[in-house]
Image (cartoon, rainbow, N blue to C red):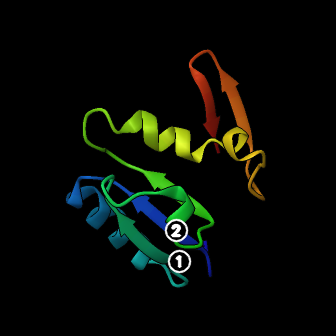
Amino acid sequence: MPHANVVILTDESEFARLLTACWQAERQAPNITVLNSNSWREQDAPDHDLVVVGPVRDGQITSVLRSLDPARRNETPPGTKTTPHSGGTCWT
């Protein structure tokens, strides 16, 4: 994703380190911001084109995914496709 802004949201630093290293190996690496679940507030998040949710602490995943739900914001982010499934909605 050249010239993209990516937020990696995880409580495991090794996950963030490995993912960041993969992207930085690309010729046109995206701008990457790493946040943990304690500092995540979608409305305060830096501008982003993609949010990668990695492992987060117990009890945090539901609130993180709810904050990313476009229906809660009454909008669908540009370039976002939603895929309904029995457990809710997946964003791709």
Image point 70% across, 32% down: which residue? 83
Residue 7: horizontal and vertical position, in percent? 47, 65
Q: In screen coordinates, is 52 left or right of 84?
A: left
Quadrant in which the C terminus is drawn: top right
What is the residue that sits farthest to the top in this orientation?
A: 86
Quadrant in which the N terminus is drawn: bottom right
State yes or no: discs 1 and 2 in contact (Cβ < 8 Å): yes
Q: Is residue 26 above or below residue 53?
A: below
Image point 59% across, 68% down: which residue? 48
Q: Is residue 1 above or below residue 71?
A: below
Residue 76: horizontal and vertical position, in percent? 77, 49
Residue 19 quadrant: bottom left
Residue 60 quadrant: top left
Q: In screen coordinates, is 3 left or right of 66?
A: right
Q: Amino acid at mark 2?
A: Val
* Badge 1 density bin: few <14, some 14–19, many ≥20, Cα 10 Å: some
Q: Earlier in the sequence, mark 1 or mark 2?
A: 2
Image point 28% across, 56% down: which residue? 15
